[in-house]
Image: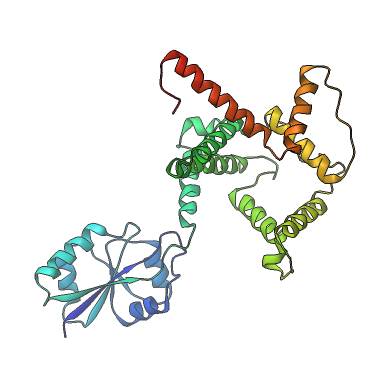
Amino acid sequence: MSRRIILLVTSPRLPAGLLTAEAWDAVRAFPVFAAAESEQAAALRTTGVTVTVLDTDAQGLLDAIGDRQAAVWLAGPGGDQAFARQLGLRLAREPQLAELELMYGSWDPPGARLLDAVTVMDRLVSPGGDPWKRAQTHQTLAPYLLEESYEAYDAIVSGDLAALREELGDVLLQVVLHARLAEEQPDGHGWNIDDVAGGLVEKMVRRNPHVFAGEQVKDIEEITANWERIKQAEKERESVLDGIALSQPALALTAKILHRVRRSGLTVPLPEAVDLGSSLLNVVAEAREAGLDPEAELRKAALAYADAVRAAENVGPAE
């Protein structure tokens, strides 16, 4: 029976020593080698597993294994791809030397790359990182958050899913950067990305009792009603208009106010259309009564007019 070389690959995003039962069986049964010291090697040593560091090539590993039945090569954080390729080619040419077996001791859970985003941002904002990012504040970054959100919205409207993927990454960058800057707040007022994510998780669980608490619902309307009821209890708002984002575009703001008023059951007469502002408010109210999104309708009309302008100029439509 030929020797076995187990190439043990682990996720650098999970705590060292968090391995599958199969991986633990392998490192306890066979000698373990690695190209360099690592957190994983240190974690194995604390459990009594001997890890031998070999700064060598494929032949050096084969010599170190000797006549042993099997051995484990502990892949480094980068996966030791060059070494694995060299070893694989050597054993493909001379299969009698050993069998190469790939074993995953741990693997990335869904969302693992978010940890990379947090790590990279920490490097950028820490001393020695990017001077521009270190100089920013929540106030100076506010316009970028709006801009990136609008670009993501444009990608959705255009149906460009590839662009949407990129634009959502830019929105995520803003979230991660704001959270990292918040860590620098003095007097114990700071918070971090875990606080942001933790608050989101708690909110999702709390506002979806039909999923997480076994509450019975008949339809989507009841789900929405539950969401609003729970939200109202959380916020303890005095007015039906509390919580509306006042910095959103005026047309969308007007539509949102009218929506809240109608949902509350209040009867508040619209102002007489005596000037441009009150006239526009009445137009928005008419659009909502007709089941139309006034922001989207105006955007559609504006873009159609823009195409007409470009046609008059004999230039192509906007991208």
Q: Is residue 152 visible?
A: yes
Total marks shown come to 0
Which residue lies most toward the top here? 313
**Colour scheme in use:** rainbow
The answer to whether 246 is drawn above or below residue 121 in the figure is above
Q: Would you say residue 57 is visible in this rendering?
A: no
Residue farthest to the front? 290
Residue 262 locus on image (x, y percent): 82, 42
Task: Residue lying at the far left in this picture: please name it.
Answer: 93
Name the spot of residue 306 as percent of width and height, x first.
52, 21
Comparing 117 with 205, the one in front is 205
Quadrant including the C terminus: top left
In the image, taking residue 159 as reference, residue 8 lies left or right, namely left
Q: Quadrant of residue 34?
A: bottom left
- For the point 37% across and 76% down, the residue is 23
Task: Name the one closer to the observer, 318 or 173.
Answer: 318
**What percent of the width, then of the height, locates residue 266?**
89, 41
**294 lies above or below 262:** above
Q: Position of residue 200 (x, y in %)?
A: 65, 53
Corner quadrant of residue 257 = top right
Left or right of residue 218: residue 265: right
Residue drawn 67% across and 57% down?
Answer: 204
